[in-house]
Image (cartoon, rainbow, N blue to C red):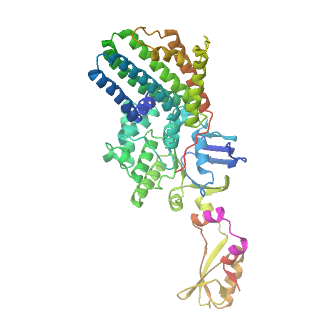
Amino acid sequence: MRPIVLIATNFAREQRWPLFFLLLWVVGWATFGIFADPRSGPDDALMIFRQLAVYSVTFGLFFGSSAIHSDQRSRRILAVLSKGISRGQYVAGLLAGIALVLGIFCFCMGFTASWLLGRYGFSESAMWFGMLALWTVCTLTASLTLLLSTFLPPLFAAIGAGVLAGIPALLALRGDTFSKYVIPVHGLLEPLIGADFAESWNASIGLVLLAWIEVAVFSLGAAWIFSRRDLSVSVE
Amino acid sequence: MALALEYEGISKEYCSWSRRRPVRALQQFSLSVERGEVFGFLGPNGAGKSTAIHLAMGFMRPTSGAGRMLAKPFGDAGTRRRVGFLAENVSLYHRRAEAAIGFYGGLNGLHGPALDRGVKSALEAVDLHSEAGRSVSQFSRGMLQRMGLAQALVNDPELLILDEPTSALDPAARVSIRELLLGFRNQGKTIFLSSHLLSEVELVCDRVAILSHGRLLRIGTLKEMLATTGQVEIVAHSISNTVFTDSMVDGERLRFTVPIGRQREAIERVWSEGGEVVSINPVRRSLEELFLELTNPVPNDVVAGESGTVS
C-alpha cells in the first residue's frame, strides 16, 4: 500500500501546475460570484459550473493518457520500476494520484459551489453528492484512458477513451436504457450538466458504485496489460 | 552459493508495427555472474548491453530463454528490493535531493529510521550530503549522475547493476566512484558494471564480458583475456636493426615482436648475429585493444603485417 501512496502523492506533486491552473478557474468562478449581477448571476454561475465539470473530465482524460507515457519519455520510470514494486502497484499509484488531483479540484469546486450556488437556492447535500459523482466520472474516465494508454500512444488513448465513453452516451440519448450502465460517464454527468434551479439533481448512488467497480476493473486491466508489455523508454 | 545473475540462452527480438523484420537485440545469450565479483559488461553501442540489463530488471521479457537474479526469475519485484540499479542517462523526479532519495527508498520498502539512515548514507557515499536540501532540478549533469547512484544505494543492495555510472563525471568524481565500487567489492557486494570507459573497467573489474550484435564474444578474467595476444616482445642489443623488420631502435637496444611459436627461431637469430637477448616478455593487450579487435575485426593480412617478422 505504501508504494501506491508514494507514487500517488508524487504524481499529484508533479501535476501541481495543471492543478493550479484548474483551481484558478474555480477562483475566477468565485470572483465572478462576488461581482455578478443579481439578475443574471444564478444562470451564469450555473453555466460556469457546467464548464468546470466538463473541464475536470477532460483533465481526467489527459492525465490518464499521459501518466505512463510522460514517465517513459523522461526515463524516470526506470528508477521507479527498478525498485521493489510491481507494475500493478505502479499503475494503481498513478490512478490514485490522478484521483487525488481531481479530488482536490472537485472538493474546491464543491466548496465554492456550496457558497455560490447555495446562495441561489441549491441544496448543499445534493451539490456535494454531485461533486462525488463528478469525481467518480473523472476517475472513471482517467482509468479507462490509463488502460488504453498501456498499449496506445497518448493521443489515441485519449481519443479512444472519448469514443468508448461517448458510444453509451449516444445510445442513451437514442433511448437505450441499459447503455447508461456501460461506462456510465454520461449517466453520471448528465444530471450535473442538465441541472437547473427548478430541478434538483438526481445522480444515482447505484451508478456511482457501478462506476467505481468499473474503475477497479479498468485498473486491473491496465495493470495486467502493462505488466506484460516491454518498457519502451526514449534514448537520449 | 547461488549466482548473482544468470542468463540462460536468452534471445530478445524487438518487433514493431512499422518494421517488417524484427530486430534481434540478443541472440542465445548466456552469462553467469558470481556473488561478490565486480563484473564488467562491455560492447559497442547497439550491442545489446542495455537490453540485457533491462531484461534482468524485468523491464522487458525475453523472446526465448530465461534468467535469474539473486536466485529468483527475472522480474521478481521482491528481489529488486535487494538490488540497486542505475540507468544510463539517469532521470529523477525534481524534488529536494533528500526527499527524492527518500521517495526511492520508500518504494523499496524502507521507512522510519531505516529510511533516514539509508538516505543519509547514500548521499554521503556520493558526496552529496551537503546538497541534501537542494532541488534535483538545479543539479549539474555530474551531480545528477551521483544522485542516480545514491538512489541505487539507498537500500544497501546486495547486487548493484550500473549502466554507465561514471559517464558524466569529472575525473575527481570518477575516482571517488571507483573507490566506492572497490569498497563495495570489499564488503562482498556484487557489481554488474556496463561501461564504455574501458580503463575504468580494467581498474575495477574481476571479470569481463564483451558483447557485440547481441552475441557474447568473450568472457573471462582480465588476466586471461589480456595475456593472450600470442606475441612476445624481445629486447636485444649489439645487433643491427636490419636483421628484424618492423623492429624499433631504443638507444643501443633493438625491440621487436614475434609470434610465440617463432620466438626460439628469433632468439637463435639474435645469437647467430652476435647479439644478446636482454628480455623476452609476453605482449599484454590493453582492454581497449582487445575490445576493438573483437568488435571491429581487422582483415587477417593487416593483423599479420603488424607483428614483427624475421627477415
Residue that sits furthest to the front in the current view: A39
Q: Is residue A215 left or right of residue A37?
A: right
Quarter the C terminus of chain B occupies: bottom right
Q: Nearer the viewer, residue B276 or B182?
A: B182
Q: Nearer the viewer, residue B38 or B269?
A: B38
Q: Nearer the viewer, residue A178 or B62?
A: A178
Image location (x, y in percent) of residue B111: 40, 30
State whether residue A102 is above or below residue B264.
above
Q: Is residue A168 visible?
A: yes
Q: Quadrant of residue B216?
A: bottom right
Q: Is residue B110 visible?
A: no
Q: Is residue B109 magenta?
A: no
Image location (x, y in percent) of residue A227: 60, 32
Residue at coordinates 57% horizontally, 40% vertically from top-left?
Answer: B57
State whether residue A219 is above or below residue B257.
above
Q: Is residue B176 left or right of residue B264?
A: left
Quarter the N terminus of chain B occupies: top right
* Chief secondary structure of the magenta portion: helix
Q: Nearer the viewer, residue B68 or B3?
A: B68
Image location (x, y in percent) of residue B94: 39, 41
Residue at coordinates 45% horizontally, 19% vertically from top-left?
Answer: A134
Q: Is residue B83 left or right of residue B136?
A: right
Q: Which residues are magenta?
A: B290-303
Image location (x, y in percent) of residue A202: 46, 9
Task: Count how many numbered circles sit on residues in the image.
Answer: 0
